[in-house]
Image (tube, rainbow, N blue to C red):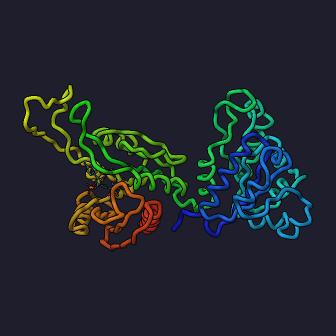
Amino acid sequence: MGIAMHLRDKTIVIGVCGGIAAYKAAELVRLYVKAGAEVHVILTRSAQEFITPLTFQTLTGNPVHTEMFNLVQEREIGHISLADRADVFVVAPATANLIGKVAAGLADDLLSTSLMATKAPVLFAPAMNVNMWDNPIYQQNQARLRMLGYRFVDPVTGFLACGWEGKGKLADPAEIFEETLALLTPQDFADETVLVTAGPTREEIDPVRFISNYSSGKMGYALARAARLRGARVILVSGPSALAVPWGVERLAVVSAEEMREAVLSRWEEATVVIKAAAVADYRPAVRAAGKVKKEGRESLSLALEKNPDILAELGRRKGHRFLVGFAAETSDLLENARKKLRAKNLDLMVANDVTQERAGFDVDTNIVRLLGPDEAEEALPEMSKDEVAGHILDRIRALRRKA
Ligand code: PMT
């Protein structure tokens, strides 16, 4: 599978510089370790004023590296071998001083020497005072490193520990984690703009009630995240969902099928791949009551429904050069129904989802699907996480697009 869904077999070297955000490096290290990575930490001398080596040693299970010429550390794992062993080298927080040193080619302590010696991709997550950030000397240093292929996760705007407000706060560790994953993931979707739909739609009956379904958005959000990690520009059109927007993804929030249709069509021209994982309501109330529908004087209530537009069928009719993927949520005759929809909606790939199976379909973290291509070749995937299903779907899209 193309995407590094876990970090087992990966060695991450993380350098921590001295700054108030140093404590957040502990959270980042925890995320790496949880994902299965082997993590080695280098603390600069000033970082040790903010956080102790013991914290990182406890989190990683590895000795923490602090000195260039420490006899014990050199014997266990020399500073050059640390640089060699890294699959990815992260510095978080990275100070203006460290970035200035690297940009100038200086190597006068363990962290700057290891950075000079490594051939691994390097990711800097800077954190500093807003005026230091704005300083043209810093900006030039950063631009020079970017030009040389170093990657950056920009700081965010907020209240800074120094009392100023502005740009300079360390990015969220979860975001730095996603950037790290992307660096370890082949960028085989770098030329694509992927439009994903996710979640349910809600069709209003009156101001307080609606018709909907159990879709949580998990499947569509996993696809959006995976495509972004593989280098795509991703537009996510989402019905109501409690999920956080995946890193680097542009989300358009919609409520009804009609709104979803408008949002999809407004971004359709840009898309090269469209994946429709949303559970769109097939019907909506023919009339939306202006006020709350009252029960007084009524023993029963009938709702007249009218058909919603079939967005996917409409996309299929004007597909052009795009690669179109549909989902089929079925409770019987899975393959037969899915094949019918594949043909009727002019799709390049159909993901057949038997939603009666336990741990598959709506509002669970796993899924069990079959992938149907236009030649009707079928691939049955075993139960796996929705992240893994997303990876397989993207692999299949990549393979079919290469063939075309
Ligand atoms: O969101 P989760 O909780 O993770 O659940 C995932 C899921 C079960 C919603 C997902 O895996 C799934 O199966 N999505 C498709 C659900 C669905 O609406 O299937 P369908 O067979 O009714 O529709 C077929 C296709 O046409 C779908 O791609 C759908 O997005 C599209 N459609 C349907 C109706 C409509 N009016 N417009 C559409 O575009």
In this view, 81 is above or below 281: below
Considering depth in this image, is 36 or 84 the residue closer to the camera?
Answer: 36
- The quadrant of the rendering that contains the C terminus is bottom left
Point 33% across, 73% down: residue: 378
Q: Quadrant of ligand 1?
A: bottom left
Considering depth in this image, is 262 or 131 the residue closer to the camera?
Answer: 131
x and y, in percent, of residue 102 in the image: 82, 49
Point 61% across, 52% down: residue: 179
Can residue 401 be seen from the camera position used here?
no
x and y, in percent, of residue 363 in the image: 36, 54
Considering depth in this image, is 150 or 225 the residue closer to the camera?
Answer: 225
Say how many tags the image has: 0
- Image quarter of residue 372: bottom left
x and y, in percent, of residue 4 in the image: 57, 63
For residue 378, side relative to residue 116 (left or right): left
Can residue 120 be seen from the camera position used here?
yes
x and y, in percent, of residue 301 in the image: 10, 38
In this view, 194 is above or below 75: above
Considering depth in this image, is 141 or 157 the residue closer to the camera?
Answer: 157
Point 27% across, 63% down: residue: 356
Point 58% across, 62% down: residue: 186
